[in-house]
Image (cartoon, coloured by chain):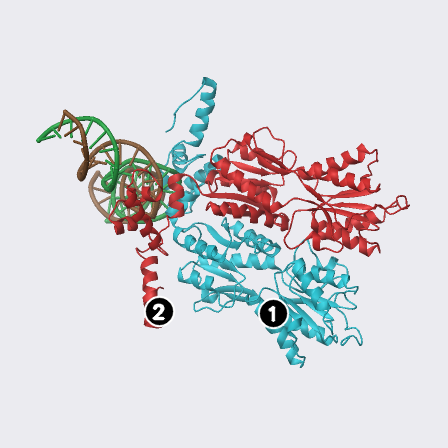
Chain colours: A cyan, B red, C brown, D green
Amino acid sequence: MPGKVVGTARAASLHDIMQSCLHHSGGLNTAMRLKDLAQHLGLSQTTVSRALNGYPEVNEATRRRVAETAERLGYRPHASALRLATGRSGAVGVVLRGAHELGPHMSEFLAGLGSRLGEQEVDIVVTIVESYADEIAAYRRAASSQKVDAVILHSPTVNDERAALLSELKIPFVLHGRTNINAPVAWLDIDNTGAMERATTHLLDLGHRRIALLNGVKGRTFSEHREIGYLAALSSRGIPFDPALMANSLFTDEAAFRLAQAMLEIRPAPTAFLAGSMMTALGVFRAIRQAGLTMGRDVSVIAHDDVFPYLNADNMFPTMSTTRSSIRQAGARLAELTLQILAGKPAEQIGELWPVELILRESSGPAPKGQTAA
Amino acid sequence: MPGKVVGTARAASLHDIMQSCLHHSGGLNTAMRLKDLAQHLGLSQTTVSRALNGYPEVNEATRRRVAETAERLGYRPHASALRLATGRSGAVGVVLRGAHELGPHMSEFLAGLGSRLGEQEVDIVVTIVESYADEIAAYRRAASSQKVDAVILHSPTVNDERAALLSELKIPFVLHGRTNINAPVAWLDIDNTGAMERATTHLLDLGHRRIALLNGVKGRTFSEHREIGYLAALSSRGIPFDPALMANSLFTDEAAFRLAQAMLEIRPAPTAFLAGSMMTALGVFRAIRQAGLTMGRDVSVIAHDDVFPYLNADNMFPTMSTTRSSIRQAGARLAELTLQILAGKPAEQIGELWPVELILRESSGPAPKGQTAA
DNA sequence: CATTTCCTTCAAAGCGCTTTGGAAACCGGC
DNA sequence: GCCGGTTTCCAAAGCGCTTTGAAGGAAATG
């Protein structure tokens, strides 16, 4: 089809340039290729390829000459060709339910992931899906089309079918969180149970007896772990658990606001809140204020802080007590683990549980006197 | 490694099916290939390929049989091979400075982008870079390695060199925002100038005379546009512009808090704030409260709302007046425009300016009496 | 000087797909 | 029974890279 119809002479020359540039020999936007480079150097493709890829069989002087010329001419191997030839795609996949998963947590996480992967020139392929079925389909597609070398799986459920599927499909993957499946899984998680247990215990130490937990979505491992920590702390002090003081929701300002508002109307009212995220904390904060109460005095709050650069616990007013763990750092580390997996390290040898800091600031204080049964 | 441990017979048969599917001919994780499929069908690769890709030369009955078998066997073309053969990578690129660009705005934007691109099975390749130099390098790399078919460029500066580079490199791209470069550019932007002008005018109508603007980073087109709208509104009423009441910063709670705090100490103090984003609004809100003032009464605030699902202006307390434009929708539309570009539509025919709603809620009210010169 | 050895380089065969240029098979019409 | 025209299918040539198997030259050995 090239050279189909050309209008005026002027247009023609421009057109031709475009053509020669775009349709040089098939691909659109053809740049310098290995063949061109080899020709330019008076060497064979083989030699150039080997020189560039650090194979020992090539003369050091030649190698330098090749490298220098390639650099100067801005040669870069065609990604697809390279992938086809090597069988590696040089990318890792992340599939997200667009509706709610692509929130601030995910963007921080991606930032960490990407910063480490970028160093290795591995890029990350993000697929946005609508439904769970779409997500499964996306993994199957990834498997058979070999689009990515590995996948990052996040926010797993307790028995995560996606993880099971991935290991069935033999797609290497690393889990951000934990799950119980019948296969070796590489994972990285933070100690949600320990964090909640400590935070709850701390509030109990301060005299709080009615402690509300605004937890994440039911079924997610991290939510379950947090619940376990919360319940463990309560039961070790013999404090009865009141289901009305525990709720599961997305970590949004809005949901938290509504839930906290409702809980504050319960009598006896909670004197403390454990907020699942900083967004949640904002909602709780609003509910407290709207109820005419003061955070840190009438009602204590400890929030889980995933460390968002734009929402700093230290700069809130009052400053926010938190259980803290940088999700960005976790992302960076997961990238590292993924690279290890791709380098052949067995999944069962990879598993890290990160401790979580408890940082006390102004939002948590002693339980108000006599109000425990107000 | 395969066939390591298998429990029951039932598990074994399932396992075997998987194996025959995955390791059919050797490679690691080799799935069904076109050749296998063709063989399975007793047809040539050509015919199968054509049948699958909807070419007219193939018998309808054959086509159905092929499609059905492909579906049943879970055949998917190898992505790299397909890309190499067609010259299209089936992906669009987004490169982000990880440090601050990958924030809540970006994740919303990506969600929109991805939801539309996903429908077309185009995936989005995210590259995280540290510095501006890295970003440029990433584009050059993308160009010569043909990793992506197009690029999305966001938050451009007034004369954006990246845009110039991209059009020089002949990488198709679509701009989220606007810039002045000497080349046709496909773009989508919201009417920042109009939005600010209206918001400012509204505050002036309410009697405010000292109106602070917490604007975005200097040099970005959207910041400049907002400044223009702000200044235009002031000057059309003959209100002098006070540079002390305008600041440029990232849209973070923290920066906004500090800036607003400082501005509130100026005498005469501002009686109204224009906040560049909802994050900014949160910081302003805190500063107002800390100064012992009440938002909506002592100090009015109008914030720009990019519509974050987890930070709802309607649910704030007081509810927040906003200039609103969904960044997620913009992302979806940009995806659409990108697809158009890839389909061959000339860039100069693509350009959309979206109007911005002004939604008045409780955070903006009449200027407090007599305080204009307090 | 002939032979062996090593070093450097190359031609060619894939990787899995699309696509071009035919070749069979089949049709009625003469 | 032969011929143009369809219809349906195929073999083979790429796409740009890596990698194997082997050849050419220089240096070393007898």
Give the residue type at disc 2.
Ala
Residue B189 falls in image quadrant: top right
Chain holding disc 2: B
Decide: is A348 above or below B126.
Answer: below
- Judged from the image, the secondary structure of the residue bearing numbered disc 1 is helix
Mark on residue B11?
2
Give the residue type at disc 1.
Arg
Q: In the rendering, at what x and y percent does residue C1 appear?
A: 21, 38
Mark on residue B53?
none
Chain holding disc 1: A
A248 sits left or right of B87 in the view: right
Q: In the rendering, at what x and y percent does residue B216 appear?
A: 70, 43
Decide: is A281 above or below B224.
Answer: below
Residue A66 falls in image quadrant: top left
Of residues A281 and B4, the one nearer the viewer is A281
Decide: is B114 above or below A236.
Answer: above
Q: In the rendering, at what x and y percent does residue A116 appear?
A: 54, 53
Residue highlighted by disc 1: A226
